[in-house]
Amino acid sequence: MKTNNYSVLDREALMQKVQMQMSTKRFKHVLGVEETAVALAEKYGAAPEKASIAALTHDYAKERPNEEFQMVIRRENFDLDLLNWNNAIWHGIVGANFVQRELGIDDEEILQAIRLHTTGAAEMTLLDKIIYVADYIEPGRSFPGVQEAREIALLNLDDAVAYEAKHTLLHLLEQEQPIYPKSIETYNRWVAKK
C-alpha cells in the first residue's frame, strides 16, 4: 500500500481488513485513535495519510493468540527475550510484522510507529509520537488524568509523550507489573531530569 496515493477507497479497504481481525470494541478504539492521530498530524505537520494508516493498523494483531506471537518470534528471528513478555508488548513489536506480511504495508515509518505505540522509545519520529499519544488519549479512553493528557497534547506533543511515559510507568508500578526496558528508556529520555 502506497501512502502518497492513499484514497477514500484505500482507507475503506484497509478498515475492512482490520475490522475482520478484532472485536467491535477494539475496532471502535482503533477508529478513535485514527481520528486523534489525523488531528495531531494536521496540527504538528505530519502526513495525515500515514497517521491514518498507522492508527488503523496499530492494534491489528492485538487479539491474536499468544501461540501465534510465540511462533512468529521464533520463526522471524526476533530477540528471544520477547518470549518472556506478553501481548501488551507483542502486539506492537511483533504486530508490525503481521501488518507488513498480511496487509502489504512496507512503509518503515508506519511500521516503526506500530512497533513503538505501547512502549515509546528514546528516539521517536513525529509519527511515532503521534501514534503513541493518540492511542493514549483517543475519545473512548476514560481514566484519571486522560483529560489533562488531551490538553497537553494540544499544546506540546513532546510534553504529551512525557506525560504518558510517566503515568504509564506509575500505573505499572502501582500494579506491580514488570516494565519492558524500552518503556524505561522512554521515561529516561522524555521525563527524567538530567
Image (tube, rainbow, N blue to C red):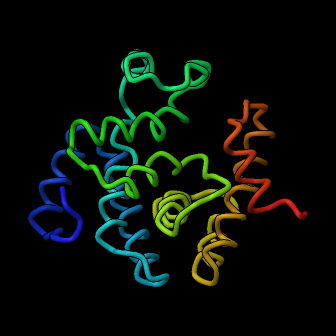
Residue at image point 37% right, 17% down: 75
Q: Of all residues shown, which one is farthest toward the right? A: 194
Image quadrant holding the N terminus, namely bottom left
Query: Where residue 112 sits: x, y (%)?
Result: 45, 51
Q: Can you tell which quarter of the image residue 23 is in?
A: top left
Residue at image point 42% right, 68% down: 37
* Total numbered labels placed on residues in the image: 0
Quick check: 81 left or right of 31? right
Q: Can you tell which quarter of the image residue 60 is in?
A: top left
Image quadrant holding the C terminus, namely bottom right
Quick check: 148 left or right of 73? right
Viewer-closest of 52 and 23 = 52
Quick check: 98 left or right of 74? left
For residue 63, above or below residue 38: above
Residue at image point 51% right, 69% down: 126
Q: Of all residues shown, which one is farthest toward the left? A: 9
For residue 173, above or below residue 157: above
Residue at image point 46% right, 65% down: 127
Query: Where residue 164 sits: x, y (%)?
Result: 67, 59
Query: Where residue 120 sits: x, y (%)?
Result: 61, 52
Query: Where residue 96 sits: x, y (%)?
Result: 38, 41
Q: Can you tell which quarter of the image residue 144 is in?
A: bottom right
